[in-house]
Image (tube, rainbow, N blue to C red):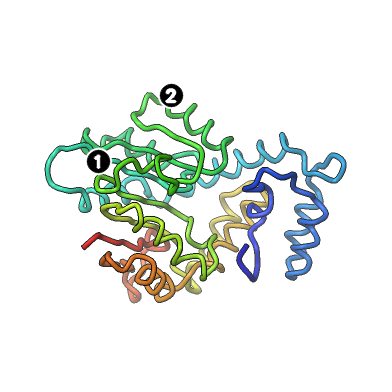
Amino acid sequence: MRPGPLEITDLLWSDSGDPVLRDEAVDLLRSRGQRRAARIVARLPERDGVLDVATVDALGLRIHRELQRLGEELQLGRRVASMVSTLLPAGDAPVRVVDVGCGLGHVLRSIAAHGDLPEHVELVGVDLNPVLVSEASRLATIEGVGCRFVSGDAFEPGVAVADGSRTVVVSSGLMHHLAPDELSGFFAAQAQLEVIAFAHWDIAPCLWSTTGAWIFHQARMREPISRHDGVMSARRAHPAETLLRAAERGAPDYAVEVREGSRWHPRALDVLRPLVGVRR
């Protein structure tokens, strides 16, 4: 867990599957000076001190539906597809695009629904949370779109990257959840799989993104956790220099760059900008 302020959603689920103790989560938030966040968690139902699993899972789905709305506002599906199309190898041999931390899979579902990538591109979303993966699969079935979703660690061999030489890895809003000293390992895992390229979108930290996050989440989000975490995400975002140094250390065989928007004429869409790496 990274130092400094936390997002509440970092604490609601355990990657190990262990029960989440409500009072421990509350005490951790208080110890970091996050009294408002602690009050939100303290109001969540518990049984014998453990956060109620059904309530938390239902809450997680509501939060990610609000995140999907944000992704639609930022046109993430179109933007990811446009970027990936420039990273695909020539020819029509099968290529797989893997979305790490896909949540409800709205990026891949949007790409599939609009036919933004060629038919030989397979779309696979991966998330550690099986509840989100199950819902993503259900929505894809209802919508009749050509993508699939699996639960697990995307960088474990065979989970999602079957052949690195034919794989492009993407994510959106994932990197700020990692501590600075974890970023190099994140990129190294992709390099070890020898993926063709990666493109990871995250928030560009600045006064505009933090202020904009507060305004947008107050206006558009209903869940108190969404409002809290949306602003915290902007505050925790890594500067471009940090991301570049980590990518260069972890994936030295890749040419990497952060594709920032204009500093003098910023657009709302540029609040999320990609770090792109292409295997040399």
Residue pointed to by mark 1: 95
Neighbours of disc 1 within 10 Å: few (<14), some (14-19), many (20+):
many
Residue 141's disc is 2
**Horizontal and vertical percent position of residue 188:** 39, 61
SS at mark 2 in the image: helix
**Horizontal and vertical percent position of residue 235:** 56, 68
Nearest-to-viewer mark from 2 and 1: 1
The amino acid type of the residue labelled 1 equals Val
Task: Give the image quarter of residue 252.
Answer: bottom left
Q: Residue at x 33, y 71 (%)?
A: 265
SS at mark 1 in the image: strand
Residue sitting nearer the eye, 275 or 79: 275
**Horizontal and vertical percent position of residue 146:** 33, 29
The amino acid type of the residue labelled 2 equals Thr
Q: Is residue 247 depicted above or below 99 in this figure? A: below
Question: Quadrant location of the C terminus?
Answer: bottom left
Q: Residue at x 40, y 58 (%)?
A: 201
Q: Residue at x 76, y 53 (%)?
A: 40
Tell me, yes or no, whether the two marked residues, 2 and 1, touch with CB atoms within 8 Å: no
Neighbours of disc 2 within 10 Å: few (<14), some (14-19), many (20+):
few
Residue sitting nearer the eye, 203 or 120: 120
